[in-house]
Image (spheres, rainbow, N blue to C red):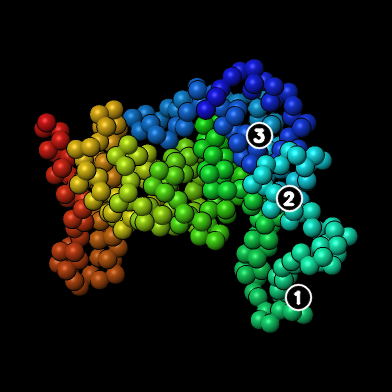
Amino acid sequence: NYHDENTRRLLLYRLDQLPECSPSGLCALPNALATPTHKVGGATANSKETALTTLDEDERAMMASATSLLCSPGVYRLPHDPRAMRSKDDFWWKQLRARHFRLRKKLRNAGRGVEAAPAARSGSKSSIVPMDEEEEEEEEEELDLQQTALAHASKAECIALLTGSARLDFRDERLLSGIEAWLCQGSRHNELSAGELADCLEAFASLGYTRPLLRAALEHALLRTAADMEPKDWARTVHGALDLGIKARSPAFRSLVRQCTSQLAFLPPDDKPTFLQLAEELLEASERQVVEEARENLKKNRSSVSAVLAGARLPLEMQMLRQALAKRKKK
């Protein structure tokens, strides 16, 4: 969390040395460029204005270069000096180094070389079952991700890259798509904690990025971590989930509402106005979904109008939240 203007200018001056950075260093770049004036705008719900500072040309050029190194297959190359790699990147360094045919042969003769089996492609002889076009596209995307530097980032580094980009208000489709692929492939979203999920929801909502696969993955993560969500993260989580398009009547939101209702007294005083406004928006969205669902059911079953109207009710969790909010307002 150290910020110094001279250090930032030194980083911008050494743009040509950016390819020498390890994947860990590239993921830390947005937070290194961000200053205390750069704040994620997704946490503010009282107004649409954000506290973001516009990037200058040098900062945008450095972020664009880092995005290309992280997300474009084949762009990132090994550093000339292996000492630039951190100790936790040693395995990745050895793995890339073993691609050289002479070194691979030397390791194999020494009994220390392990070669992974190549993936079966539809046009290869080793393919048993032919793949359709969608499966081929998914496999190509997975192979492209494995060839990028972002594929070798850890969970903390990927979240730091996302939150740093949100602080800088740097929205790049390649970067956000790469982070989405990193989260969704291999079910890495199952490793997110409640606080990390709040950071991801806030950052994606601030950058205005949403995709069906990302929405489903984060909704599943919210359902899993709703019971562990701390009161200080409620406002960010509700705001981010609504902006990403998660339905207010979904099981994930209902689990979060149960947690908020049971621990509403522990809500920080500074977050109270923001959360109360977001809770009202959540209740309105839930009511709107009930009306829309009842209207669709009426179009399908015109004969059973009474049954359709009888089933058009708010979930019990939403009604309990409304009663709890009414009591808090009286106090």
Q: Quadrant of residue 134?
A: bottom right
**Which residue position is annotated with label 1?**
123
Q: Position of residue 36 (x, y in %)?
A: 50, 23
Is 123 placed above or below 114 here?
A: below
**Which residue position is annotated with label 3?**
63
Nearer to us in this view, 117 or 280: 117
Label 3 crowd (10 A; few <14 / some 14-19 / many >=20): many
- The amino acid marked with disc number 2 is Trp
**Which residue position is annotated with label 2?**
93
Comparing marks 2 and 1, which lies closer to the viewer?
2
- Could you tell me how many numbered marks the image carries? 3
Seen at 19% across and 38% down, the residue is 265
**3D distance between C-alphas at marks 2 and 1:** 31 Å
Comparing marks 3 and 2, which lies closer to the viewer?
2
Question: Is 276 on the left or on the right of 119, as rendered?
Answer: left
Q: Position of residue 110 (x, y in %)?
A: 82, 65
- The amino acid marked with disc number 1 is Gly
